[in-house]
């Protein structure tokens, strides 16, 4: 399956205007464009999905498990709370890379813990939107 899934969680649809001092001025479509450059260069398709709803993200992770060879996931605030998303990741047979635009470890204490990290292949944190590109490379480079 020459296909990757990019999933962004709650409030990431507001990238560009949302707390630009923390998340920068790039929009979600800039993020998708950056990842697509990488997937295109490897001859892969990219499906991108954003939702503010936990269950919709669980559904998409399950679907990607059947249709894709990897997932790039920024679960946003659900990173810190969601056992349902953690269990969905653990249920799919494909690697999931966790991405955060900001450095969650230098921010408020409630952001330091990820419910997802121990079931993900790896984490890219604090590198801005470039982190999504690095995650795609990590999934695609052999
Ligand atoms: C985030 C970090 C989360 O703590 C926060 O809730 C987000 C974005 C990031 O990309 O830096 O919404 O995942």
Image (spheres, helix red, strand yellow):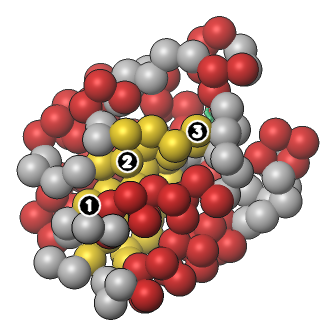
Quarter the N terminus occupies: bottom left
Q: Is residue 141 left or right of residue 14?
A: left
Q: Which residue is mark 1?
A: 70
Whole-percent x, y for residue 100 in the image: 58, 42
Respond yes or no on whether mark 3 lies under 8 Å from ligand 1. yes
Q: Is residue 99 left or right of residue 142?
A: right
Q: Quadrant of ligand 1?
A: top right
Q: How far separated are the C-alphas under marks 1 and 3?
A: 18 Å
Q: Is residue 51 visible?
A: no
Q: Is residue 30 visible?
A: yes
Assess disc 3: are there few (<14), some (14-19) or many (≥20) residues with their C-alpha within 10 Å of its C-alpha: some
Secondary structure type for disc 2: strand
Q: Which residue is mark 3?
A: 125
Q: Which residue is mark 2?
A: 97
Q: Residue at x 87, y 48 (%)?
A: 20
Rendered view: 36 above or below 80: below
Name the outermost residue toward the right. Answer: 21
Q: Nearer the viewer, residue 117 or 57?
A: 117
């Amino acid at each position: 399956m020459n296909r990757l899934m990019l999933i962004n969680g709650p409030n990431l649809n507001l990238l560009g205007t949302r707390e630009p001092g923390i998340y920068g001025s790039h929009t979600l479509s800039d993020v998708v464009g950056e990842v697509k450059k990488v997937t295109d260069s490897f001859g892969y398709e990219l499906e991108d999905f954003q939702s503010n709803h936990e269950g919709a993200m669980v559904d998409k992770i399950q679907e990607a498990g059947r249709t894709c060879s990897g997932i790039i996931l920024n679960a946003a605030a659900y990173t810190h709370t969601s056992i349902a998303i953690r269990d969905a990741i653990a249920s799919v047979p494909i690697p999931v890379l966790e991405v955060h635009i900001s450095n969650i470890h230098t921010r408020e204490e409630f952001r330091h813990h990820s419910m997802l990290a121990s079931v993900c292949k790896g984490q890219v944190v604090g590198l801005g939107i470039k982190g999504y590109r690095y995650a795609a490379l990590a999934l695609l480079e052999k």
